[in-house]
């Protein structure tokens, strides 16, 4: 048995494995998340906002669960997926000055942000940024007052 040949083969196998591991960024998943899977069972999409400058950076989704009266907001990145960039999902309920948000450097989405808003209007939005840190945002008008 040629030890040199075995060592070379083992080294080549280890190098190939290392390259494969580098191809999938930390925090990335193999299956893409959906707004419904992020918010959980019972939530359905009722509105969305693009975060766009001619290039679509992300989409902000507003979901509602009629079973519990909660809204949920998620900002799903469409650019720089797999790269941690500043991303935010936010929602505010009419009659409250509190803006509920989830923000940070995320690889695929911000959220979920859930608030009880049955019978009240909400304003929702989000922020996405490019790799250089320039931010882009979108904010809805007040609505979904059911």
Image (cartoon, rainbow, N blue to C red):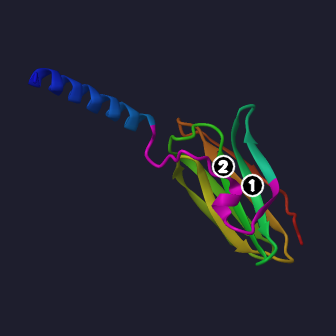
Q: Which mark is residue 76?
A: 2
**Counting other residues with Cα less than 10 Å from the Cα at mark 1, is it few (<14), some (14-19), or many (20 or more)?**
many
Rendering quarter of residue 101 = bottom right
Q: Which residues are magenta?
A: 24-47
Q: Which mark is residue 133?
A: none
Q: Secondary structure at mark 1?
A: strand
**Counting other residues with Cα less than 10 Å from the Cα at mark 2, is it few (<14), some (14-19), or many (20 or more)?**
many
> In the visual, does 88 lie left or right of 65?
left
Residue at which label 1 appears: 61
> Which residue is at the front of the view, 74 or 133?
74
- Residue at 74% x, 38% y is 52
- Residue at 66% x, 40% y is 78
- Disc 2 to disc 1, C-alpha distance: 8 Å
- Image vertical order of residue 138 relative to residue 72, above or below: above
Residue 43 belongs to the span the image colors magenta = yes
Judged from this view, the residue extending furthest toward the right is 146
Residue 26 x/y as whole percent: 43, 46
Residue 41 x/y as whole percent: 70, 68
- Image vertical order of residue 60 relative to residue 8, above or below: below
- Residue at 87% x, 63% y is 143
- Image vertical order of residue 64 relative to residue 67, above or below: above
Rendering quarter of residue 81 = top right
């Amino acid at each position: 048995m040629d030890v040199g040949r075995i060592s070379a083969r083992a080294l080549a196998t280890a190098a190939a494995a290392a390259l494969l591991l580098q191809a999938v960024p930390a925090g990335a998943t193999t299956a893409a998340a959906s707004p419904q899977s992020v918010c959980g069972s019972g939530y359905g999409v009722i509105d969305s906002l693009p975060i766009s400058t001619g290039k679509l950076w992300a989409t902000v989704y507003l979901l509602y669960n009629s079973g519990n009266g909660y809204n949920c907001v998620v900002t799903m990145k469409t650019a720089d997926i797999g790269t941690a960039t500043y991303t935010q999902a936010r929602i505010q309920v009419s009659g409250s000055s509190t803006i509920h948000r989830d923000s940070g450097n995320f690889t695929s989405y911000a959220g979920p942000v859930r608030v009880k808003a049955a019978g009240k209007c909400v304003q929702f939005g989000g922020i996405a940024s490019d790799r250089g840190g320039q931010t882009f945002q979108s904010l809805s008008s007040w609505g979904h007052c059911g």
